[in-house]
Amino acid sequence: MKLKHFASFAGFISLTACASLIVPNTKGYCVCAAPGTEEDLVANVGDRVFYPFDKATLGTDADATLGRQALWLSKYASVKILVAGNTDDRGTETYNLALGGRRADAVRDYLVAQGVSESRIQTISYGKECPVAIFNGKANDQENRNAITSVRGLNPQNCH
């Protein structure tokens, strides 16, 4: 009986703690994420932008996401980020590393133009070595052509 009461109390405490962290996100529903964390960035701002084949220029969808990232970074001024540029699996390793670098740099340049200090932004290129979608196909290739922003110190894809 005591265990049942303890379990109910523990559940209530965890819900109460989480309720203070629930925030609306861009999809219109709430997610439990501590403000200023990786989870907050991913769930409520958006952590990635996508590129057309063989391009490193930002489109209008990227503009919206990066605008939200710039606002989020201005709100959490102590947060430093890592921007990882990625490509699909076509092309040589050397070419894709350079293209991924240009994609990451494009995100950095956008954020800096929005007032984010360049000293808070680190960039890296994984080229084709860290695919988000691992199955072959046009849709997966599109998903892998991206730049992913993460809170620095956390690797967005666990790639090295």
Image (cartoon, helix red, strand yellow):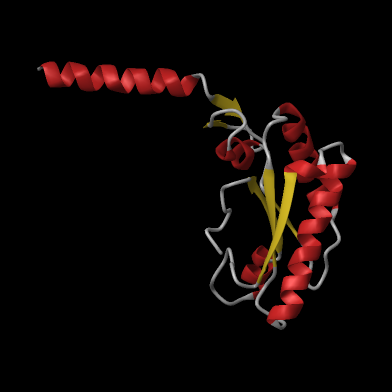
Quarter of the image for residue 57 reads bottom right
Left/right placement of residue 62 relative to residue 154 reads right
Front residue of 71 and 4: 71
Q: How many marks?
A: 0
Quadrant, the N terminus: top left
Give left or right: position of 67 versus 28.
Answer: right
Horizontal side, residue 160 vs residue 4: left or right: right
| Quarter-of-image position of residue 3 | top left
Q: Residue furthest front?
A: 119
Q: Report the residue that reaches farthest toward the bottom.
A: 92
- Image coordinates for residue 38, horizontal then vertical, percent: 58, 40
- Asked where in the image residue 22 lies, by quadrant, the reply is top right
Place of residue 113 in the rendered image (x, y in percent of width and height, measured from the top left): 90, 43
Q: Residue at x 54, y 71 (%)?
A: 134
| Residue 65 placement (x, y as % from top left) | 76, 44
* Residue at the image position 78 percent from the left and 43 percent from the top: 119
For the C terminus, give its image quadrant.
Answer: bottom right
Tell me: 84 left or right of 117: left
In the figure, 138 relative to 39: above or below?
below
The residue positioned 84% from the left and 55% from the top of the image is 59
Residue occupying image coordinates x 73% and y 75%: 96
122, 134: nearer the viewer: 122
As drawn, the residue found furthest toward the left would be: 1
Where 116 sits versus 108, above or below? above
Residue 127's spot in the image, x, y percent?
68, 70
User: Is 134 drawn above or below residue 27 in the view shown?
Assistant: below
